Image (cartoon, helix red, strand yellow):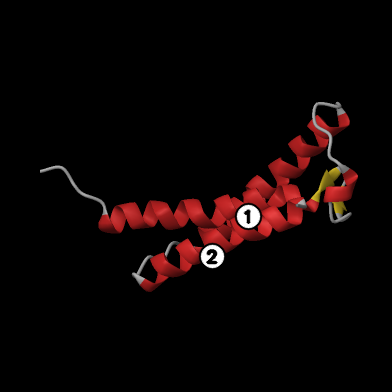
Amino acid sequence: MSYLEINTWFITGVIVVTAVLFFLGVRPSLRAMAASLLVVGVLTAIFDNAIIGAGLVAYDESTLSGVMVGLAPVEDFAYTLAGAILIPMVWEALGKFGRTSS
C-alpha cells in the first residue's frame, strides 16, 4: 500500500468527522484554520526537509507519488492538513457540547 492510499483513508476519516461536526453546528473560524494551516505547513516543510536531509528518515521510493516539496514527499503534508482541520473542529465541539463544571 502506498503512502497516498494510506493518506486517502486517513483524510476520508477526517472529512467524515468534520462533516458530522459541521452538521451538528460546529463552525470554527476559517481564518484561524487557514492561518494554522499556513504556519504548520511551513514548519512541516522546514523540519521534514531537515530530518530527511540529515538521513534520519528515508522512504521507499516505490510507495511515494513522486511529488516533492524539496526533499519531503507531498504525502507528509496530509497529517498537517488533517490536524489544521480536525483540531479546531474538535476544539469547537468540546466548547459547544462539552460538560461544564458546576
Along the line of sight, which residue is nearer the eye, 55 or 42? 55
Query: Which corner quadrant holds the C terminus?
Result: top left
**Disc 2 target residue:** 15
Q: Residues within 10 Å of mark 2 (few under 14, many from 20)?
A: some
Q: Disc 2 residue type?
A: Ile
Q: Secondary structure at mark 1?
A: helix
State how many labels appear.
2
Image coords of residue 15 (percent x, y) = 54, 65
Query: On the picture, is 59 further left or further right than 7?
Result: right
Image coords of residue 32 (percent x, y) = 52, 57
Q: Residue furthest bottom?
A: 23
Q: Secondary structure at mark 2?
A: helix
Q: Residue furthest front?
A: 1
Q: Residues within 10 Å of mark 1 (few under 14, many from 20)?
A: some
Q: Residue at x 82, y 44 (%)?
A: 72
Query: On the picture, is 10 further left or further right than 25?
Result: right
Image coords of residue 55 (percent x, y) = 86, 27
Q: Disc 1 residue type?
A: Leu
Q: Residue at x 89, y 54 (%)?
A: 66
Query: On the picture, is 61 further left or further right than 16?
Result: right
Q: Residue at x 86, y 51 (%)?
A: 68
Q: Nearer the viewer, mark 1 or mark 2?
A: 2
Image coords of residue 23 (percent x, y) = 38, 73
Q: Residue 46: which numbered mark, if any?
A: none
Along the line of sight, which residue is nearer the eye, 23 or 64? 64
**Disc 1 target residue:** 81
Instruction: Tell which circle, 1 or 2, labels the residue nearer the N-terminal end.
Output: 2
